Image: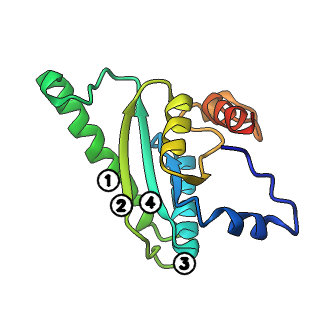
Amino acid sequence: MKLLNFGRNHGALVLRAYLPIMKTIVVPIDFSATSGSALRLGVYLAELLQLQLRALHVTDLALSGAHSLMTPEQRRKEKELKENLEEFIHRHLTLVEDGNPPLSHPEVNTTLLTGAAARQIINLSEKENTVLIIMGGVGKGADKYAPGAYGSVARSVAARVAS
């Protein structure tokens, strides 16, 4: 995947050229306000461009994909994370901002992954034929960065996509 630098006048044409083969918008969610804003933008663009939308949360908890190998505690944590992700999506998509009604939206598919966030975001985006990754510039660590600076995950994703 390459980072698309949409020039001022050519962005829409370049994006349309990728749409026949790219089908998904991926929105990483870290439960921060910036990821809520990214989700709302992702929903708007998915509906406008008729693309699939995938909300992704990456955790460093040791959750196994093989449910038979998971402990009861791991199953409980995975269930709790899934519920939190669904509730976050619902809350941000029914939010009324500036007097505007809540968003009507396409189905939002959800995925929980374990591991290094930037790597998992890139890996999923390659498997999903992703046209866009929309994420907040900073998430939970917003208080650590000066205004206009990107957090470590956003910086890592942008650097890996651009290479």
Q: CA distance from mark 1 to mark 3?
A: 22 Å
Of badges 3 and 4, the one in the foreground is 4
Mark 2, residue position? 90
Q: CA distance from mark 2 to mark 1?
A: 5 Å
* Identity of the residue drawn at 36% across and 50% down: 110
Please say if the residues under marks 2 and 1 sit with CB atoms less than 8 Å apart: yes
> Front-most of 36 and 65?
65
Label 3, secondary structure: give it: loop
Q: Image quadrant for the C terminus?
A: top right
In the image, what residue type sits under mark 2?
A: His
In the image, what residue type sits under mark 1?
A: Glu
Instruction: Locate residue 153: give its quadrant.
Output: top right
Of badges 1 and 3, the one in the foreground is 1
Q: Residue 46 appears at what percent x and percent y?
A: 53, 67
* Identity of the residue drawn at 58% across and 60% down: 21
Q: CA distance from mark 4 to mark 1?
A: 9 Å
* Disc on res. 99: 3
| Numbered circles on residues, count | 4
Q: Quick check: 109 left or right of 142?
A: left
* Identity of the residue drawn at 65% across and 27% down: 144
Q: CA distance from mark 3 to mark 4?
A: 15 Å
Please say if the residues under marks 1 and 3 sit with CB atoms less than 8 Å apart: no
Characterize the local packing of mark 3: few (<14), some (14-19) or many (20 or more) Cα atoms within 10 angstroms: few
Q: Residue 20 appears at what percent x and percent y?
A: 59, 66
Q: Quick check: 7 left or right of 126?
A: right
In the image, what residue type sits under mark 4?
A: His
Label 2, secondary structure: give it: helix
* Identity of the residue drawn at 31% across and 20% down: 62
Mark 4, residue position? 92
Q: CA distance from mark 2 to mark 4?
A: 6 Å
Please say if the residues under marks 3 and 4 sit with CB atoms less than 8 Å apart: no
Mark 1, residue position? 87
